[in-house]
Amino acid sequence: MGPIPLCVLLPVTVLAVVAAVAAEGNAVDDEYTWPQWKMPLVRKRRTVPLSAPKFSAHFQSELSGTCGIECQDRLPSPSLDDLEQLLSYETVYENGTRTYTSVSVQGLSEVTAFSRNISSNSRHKREVYGTDTRFTISDKQYSTKYPFSTSVKISTGCSGVLVSHKHVLTAAHCIHDGKDYLEGFDKLRVGILKDKSRRGKGGKGRGGRGRRRKGEKGKEDVEEREENNEKGDRKGKGKGRKNRSRRSVEPEKPSFKWTKVKKTQVPKGWFKGVSDGLAADYDYAILELKKSPKVKHMDLGVIPSVKKLPAGRIHFSGFDDDRPGNLVYRFCSVSEESKDLLYQYCDAKPGSSGSGVYIRLKEPGKKKWKRKIIGVFSGHQWVDVDGNGMQQDYNVAVRITPLKYAQICYWVHGDSSECQLA
């Protein structure tokens, strides 16, 4: 066979290079795209009535004795029977009645297993250290618009996030201490940020819609702007760095519209004496509101690894106690993750527990970016690291796994057939 003519070789080479670049581009796009999962199904087996709770528990802003990521590594993997017991749940209604529902799990073998721990050697405490990395979203033009408007305040002293038109996801310890429901549970309320004040409806005054001023940024630019400020701070190596709390704008403080809770649902895995060290994995609950607020909610999402994402950042907003009445937003990296828990670097204070932890990726087959809740901020916890009683304090978030997605989705929709894909 003779030599290949240059006029033939060049186009073939160019096509090969183009194909390689396209393949690399698709791989990069896949990294920024929400994975599609076939979810297991959580189905109701039986519901039985229980005696009314005592409502005698006291709220604890910090949890202790948590079996953390390292501690859980030494525990045996739960069987299917164990998982069904952990995912069974209690429901408490506004009139004080209580029921227990046992569940069955189907299709678990079809779910791709989550990765085990992805560790880093560096650890950080949760209390604010160094420069405060939180942003106060006190201007109502931002705090009452998506995604910040999905954050809600719970009357027990926690935060939460709207995951449907009438359901709030929060931490289980915000309403239950593992033994009993909190005092004041019978008066449980959820505060939704109000869009307008009573004065100046539709006018130029406070609370009026008015027109956007020239040069005024859109409400969803806040996240991008703050992340750009963070990058700028890093490049500046700390010179002339301003405290972020001073950079926050402070016009009109937000107000709340309080709504009664119709019923709550808590997984049995949260109850003491049931989970054998896994209680931290089940620190989540759903509150169903009596009235639906006219506010856009945020969907749930499942991601196999946060640390493997190109940016590797999480975001959440809540109502930290040291900034009363204000919504506080933050973003940060994840230091360590297991299939059920996240340790992360975000600064936070009591009051932020129960906040929805979210990330933003592209929708499959689309260029549009979408935020989804991938966890619940459990808060500052004293974690049993080595299983020997020695405790360290970390920021802990509970991940939304396929099983938790299936359970929460069932609570929200009441029909597991609507929860087959995420």
Image: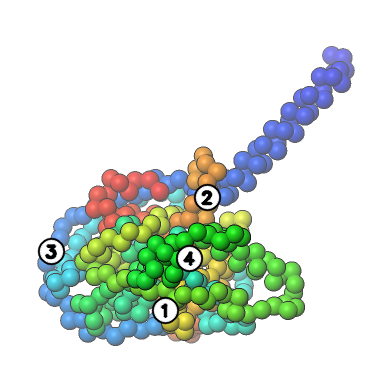
* Helix, strand or loop at mark 4: helix
Q: Nearer the viewer, residue 296 or 265?
A: 296
Real-space Cα separation, disc 1 to disc 3, in angstroms: 40 Å
- Residue 48 is marked as 3
Q: Residues within 10 Å of mark 1 (few under 14, many from 20)?
A: some
Q: Residues within 10 Å of mark 4 (few under 14, many from 20)?
A: some
| Relative image position of residue 400 (x, y in whole percent) | 41, 60
* Helix, strand or loop at mark 1: loop
Label 1 with label 2: CB-CB less than 8 Å: no
Real-space Cα separation, disc 1 to disc 2, in angstroms: 30 Å
| Relative image position of residue 22 (x, y in whole percent) | 67, 37
Q: Nearer the viewer, mark 1 or mark 2?
A: 1
Task: Name the residue rendered at 37%, 65% in the picture.
Answer: 201
Ranked by sequence position, the earlier of labels 4 and 2 is 4
Q: Nearer the viewer, mark 4 or mark 3?
A: 4
**Quick check: 387 left or right of 224?**
left
The residue type indicated by label 2 comes to Trp
According to the picture, the residue beneath numbered tag 4 turns out to be 141
- Residue 325 is marked as 1
The residue type indicated by label 4 comes to Gln
Q: Residues within 10 Å of mark 2 (few under 14, many from 20)?
A: some
Q: Nearer the viewer, mark 1 or mark 3?
A: 1
The residue type indicated by label 1 comes to Gly
According to the picture, the residue beneath numbered tag 2 turns out to be 369
